Amino acid sequence: MTIKSSREEEKQALGSMIWKMAEELRGSIDGWDFKQYVLGILFYRFLSENLSNYFNKEQRIFDRKFNYAQISDIEAEAERNETIKEKGFYILPSELFQNVVQKASNENLNEVLAKVFLNIENSARGQESESDFKGLFDDIDVNSKKLGNNVIERNKKLIQILKSIKSLNFGDYAECSTDAFGDAYEYLMSMYASQAGKSGGEYFTPQEVSHLLVEIVMHGNDELNRVYDPACGSGSLLLKFIKVFGKEKIKGGFYGQEKNLTTYNLCRINMILHNINFNKFDIAHGDTLINPSEKHPPKSFQGIVSNPPYSVKWEGKDNPILINDSRFSDAGVLAPKSKADLAFTMHILSRLHTTGTAAIVQFPGTLYRSGAEQKIRKYLLDNNYIYSVIQLPKDLFFGTSIATCIVVLKKSKEDNKVHFIDASSEFKKSANKNKLSDNNRKKIMDAYIKRNDIPYFSSLVDKKIIEENNYSLNVSTYVQEEDTSEVIDIKELNKEIATIVSRQRVLRKQIDAIVNDLEGIES
């Protein structure tokens, strides 16, 4: 207990220090835009220390004073090829973060950094890791006018960023830096997202919601082969498997796809910052609904977690190819052009392994809207794919106050029923947002696992009843809301009213007598 508390205290202290640093450096640059510089340089420091530690650990067996950062580039070149096969990238000693900070100059720092970033990316060119490193530093524009009106001003700001990130204390690198760097990244992402408003929701799922999703998917499994998120954002959902269960529980690696280029880069950075080797993750760039990655084939993922964008537009029936796409054709209809929610659901179902589980955060309208969405729900229910529907509290997510829900899919159910859980009241207030506490999450998971009826909280419903309700999956249809209004005894109330009326009559007579007396005096 003490260790855990100490760990949490360290995370909070690190988070406060990072946010203070970011606010001091930001200046006139919008916080959500400025994140790319802070996160990018943080990533650069991680790669440098990761590689240095890799060499130092190997060489200090023979020479206790060996320090990779202090050897010459010529000496280091001899290890390039073998290191790239193992690590996926390479950085020469002169281009390590610590050495660049030490020699940083107002005159040419932008040129030095641009060269270093290019060299890191080029080190993976032609290698198995090329796709994981290509374009990772594209969003760090060291010549942007946002940093300053001229080269001197821009380099001054870059020096500030480098030195501030150098000052962050991650402790003993070999022992704890992976967690510390990852914690730093996640803290920055969550804070930027909370300040960014609507756009932040595209990048970050609240950690307690992520925790619930991965618990749902892992339930009943000691380990999973491969996990997947078709709209992975910055990767926080996928990496929550590591935080909750440990890296060793995911044997085959982490897979995802992201449409937004900046967020795609952030996701790859996040994977590497959490020390996921290049051959243990595959993050694709592109529109999952229109061009799904060939590296993410059908029925290949035991665990799928996702928080896809809510009710976004897509090509839908305007694209004649889609209706014949095996992902959507079985339902006989495409999700509406103005609402792609169930298109993501159908895609996820197509990628789900026969023995797998998918947990999807969805906009509540998908549960009850008519038309094409009703037909898709009918297909999902008729084929017995819907395992559970969980109503979440409102105001959990950055950028929206709506009460979202979780839809759980399985292809190997033991019954022909759907379990509904109403967790709309399971939250605690945290600043200007609601939050799932550990107790809230455990209560939801306990109900999910037991799959039983709990008055006013959960209900196991037969498919026939759902059919009678026009295939509505709205939780409130099946879980009765508790009546918290005061019970009133009508007989007692009538007695009380009669007493009041009687008393009024007495008072009226007394008032009339007083008025008559006064009128007599005036006469």
Image (cartoon, rainbow, N blue to C red):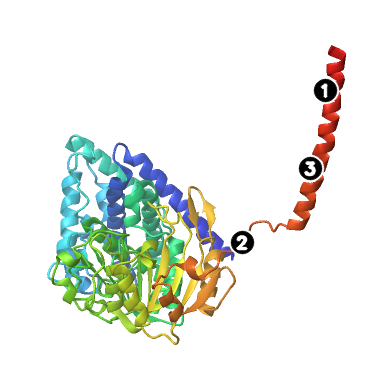
Q: Which residue is mark 1?
A: 515
Q: Tell whether label 3 touches label 1 (CB within 8 Å).
A: no
Q: In the rendering, at what x and y percent does residue 70 appear?
A: 26, 58
Query: Could you tell me which quadrant the N terminus lies in?
Result: bottom right
Q: Secondary structure at mark 1?
A: helix
Q: Earlier in the sequence, mark 2 or mark 3?
A: 2
Q: Give the Cα separation between the discs numbered 1 and 3.
A: 21 Å
Query: Could you tell me which quadrant the C terminus lies in?
Result: top right
- Is 509 above or below relative to 455? above
Q: Which residue is mark 3?
A: 501
Q: Earlier in the sequence, mark 2 or mark 1?
A: 2
Type of amino acid at the residue the image marks with label 2: Asp
Q: Residue at (19%, 55%) from the top-left corner?
A: 117
- Closest to the observer: 33 or 21? 33
Q: Secondary structure at mark 2?
A: loop
Name the mark nearer the viewer: 2 or 3: 3
Query: Residue 162 got which mark?
Result: none
128 horizontally vs 361: left or right? left
Is residue 62 at least partly visible in the picture? Answer: no
Q: Residue at (28%, 81%) from the top-left corner?
A: 300
Type of amino acid at the residue the image marks with label 3: Val
The quadrant holding residue 389 is bottom left
Is residue 185 at least partly visible in the picture? Answer: yes
